[in-house]
Amino acid sequence: MRDVLVEVRDLDVYYYNIKVLSKVSFQVYKGEVYALVGESGCGKTTTANAILRILPEIARVGEQSVINYYLENGDCINLLKMPEKKFSREIRWREISMVFQGAQNSLNPTLKVKTHFFETAASHGIMDKEEVYRRAYELLEAVKLDAERVLNSYPIELSGGMKQRVIIALALFLNPRFVILDEPTTALDVLVQREIISLLMELKKQFDLTYMLITHDIALVADIADRVAIMYAGRIVEESSVENIFYDPKHPYTIALLNSVPKIGDFEKLPEGLPGSPPDFKNLPRGCPFHPRCKYAMEICRKLEPSLIEMGDRRIACHLYAEEVSEE
Amino acid sequence: MSENVIEARNIVVRFYISTSFLKRRAFNAVDNVSLEIKEGSIVGLVGESGSGKTTLGKVTLDLLKPYKGDVLFRGKSIYKMSKEEYLKYRLNAQYIPQDPYGSINMFKRVGEALLDIVMYHHLAPDRKEAMEIVRSVMNSVGLTPPDRYLNKYPFQLSGGERQRLSIARALILKPAYIVADEPTTMLDASLKANLVKTLRDMVKDLGLSLLYITHELTLLQYFGPDTEVAIMYLGKILEKGTIKDIMLDPIHPYTKALLAAIPVPDPKERYTRKIMLKGPAPSPLNRPKGCVLSDRCPFAEPICKKEEPLLNEISPNREVACHLFG
């Protein structure tokens, strides 16, 4: 059995009284790339924010929810039960960090890149500017930037790809073991995307990292993920190895997602795109939340929500594959 | 009908940046580029950010004045038009912007936003008939049923719905020519297909012409294998051809690199993919001498660094600007 690094169990998150995550459970193994995949608004980023404990103030985490994190010495801690002070001192950025979505906007336009490093360091109690500068220099070289120039630049002087590299360097600043990548390549051009992806994989090797990838880009998942969880309406609907998901998808939503990417040079079978619109959390349909858009919806799908069951080496929540549930 | 709706001739767009106090440096964001859009056809303009594709699109809409060059609308230069002719061109050339979040007035309801356009241009004698036009446009772009959306504010719309509103705004004037500037970048993959298909059907039904600006080659496939595509890099067009030829038989090294970089949803592919070009794209300020790609091209030869290759017709409907093929 592989070593577990992060275990999320029955994670419920409410915004006011609206449930946006429902019983999300998964494990991330050490050294792998675990991908959370789904359309915007399906709860992927909320899951990441819950792990890093940066949910907005209106959010409430369910009582039963557990997020276990395994430290290097083997100790297991429930992140949700930790006092905030201890969490920010010992876990956030030191153990778990995040590359936020939208490289263009997450740097402060009025601060030089080096100031970003100083501030990150200061908020974690590191005041020695010379040391910070040296470490920042090292990291910027590791992400293949001209460190000297970039440290003294303002964000406006950098291209989108360069900003993304700076953000990655900032995420690695305190030597984390677990890095959450939230849409690391959206808003970048295809050629730059490729460079960032191969950089991320190099860094993973170099610093012995574990990644959780959050994206709606199926092709990116195929490129770097080891295991994949497909999310819909705040639930995991299917989870398995990347091979299983791509070569033998089972859940109708997974199949629809995979079919949404056009293939190069294939003019005959162009994807149709999903009918209908993404789910509205304020009034989720009864039963399976996907049934209004599902080709295979049956009577039971409109009444009973399928639970996530194990089926061989995958987990799936769909009535098509769960006769035993429907008999109840 | 093979007449050109829009013809851009040898367009040069020059931008200036201040390097220090009172000092400016000029660079050409678009450098001597020509583009023709035939009546009722779709042309794809593909390139990375900074390649000048949006700039060129805006020139054809007269939102930007070029430094040199001419834009013809139905054979007549838009810079030499009479007032009436220019007004006619203005109404006939519309724009679908990239960002549906920044480009829609957030204080106007969907119905008002569209109705205002109709009333402003006196397209209908009274409000009732104007409403009919609004409804029919909303139906055709997929904001259905219209009554559900008429009273909504933009913040109540999803990204896909906003973008449909942008399309409705452009279409309501029944233009002859539309520039769509990456209308799908902010959308999820499953919605992209729907939106592109909506656009395609509109173009076919109304017989308009479309310049579709994007960095995603694969999306252009929805417009059919014979869609014309121009590949831009650092202000130059490097290759022109039908989407089918470009995808199945790319000639220019940059086009090849672009195609190789398109992510393929197949886990097996991850071991065989590599980056073909050296380093990042230079800023247009430090454009290399000779061929614009010469500093990154793996096949570059001495001549590429000295002499600029010109677009050369190598077979019918296929033009390439590369010393290796010409």
Image (cartoon, helix red, strand yellow):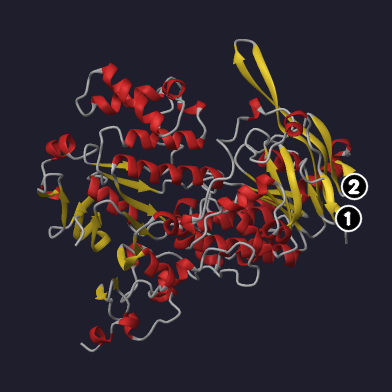
Where, quadrant-wise, is the N terminus of chain A in this rendering?
Answer: bottom left
Q: Is residue A37 visible?
A: yes
| x and y, in percent, of residue A10 in the image | 19, 62
Q: Which residue is mark 2?
A: B75
Q: Residue at x 70, y 34 (%)?
A: B292
Q: Quadrant of residue A87?
A: top left
On the rendered structure, is A18 left or right of B273? left
Q: Chain of mark 2?
A: B
Identified by mark 1, the residue type is Glu
| x and y, in percent, of residue B259 in the image | 61, 53
Q: Report the label total.
A: 2
Q: Chain of mark 1?
A: B
Where, quadrant-wise, is the C terminus of chain A in this rendering?
Answer: bottom left
| x and y, in percent, of residue B79 in the image | 85, 36
| Within-10-Å neighbours for mark 2: few <14, some 14–19, many 20+ | few
Residue sitting at the far top? B21
Observer-nearest residue: A309 or B36? A309
Identified by mark 2, the residue type is Gly
On the rendered structure, is B53 left or right of A16? right
Q: Which residue is mark 1?
A: B3
Q: Is disc 2 placed on a helix, strand or loop?
A: loop
| Within-10-Å neighbours for mark 1: few <14, some 14–19, many 20+ | few
Observer-nearest residue: A276 or A119? A119
Observer-nearest residue: A227 or A293? A227
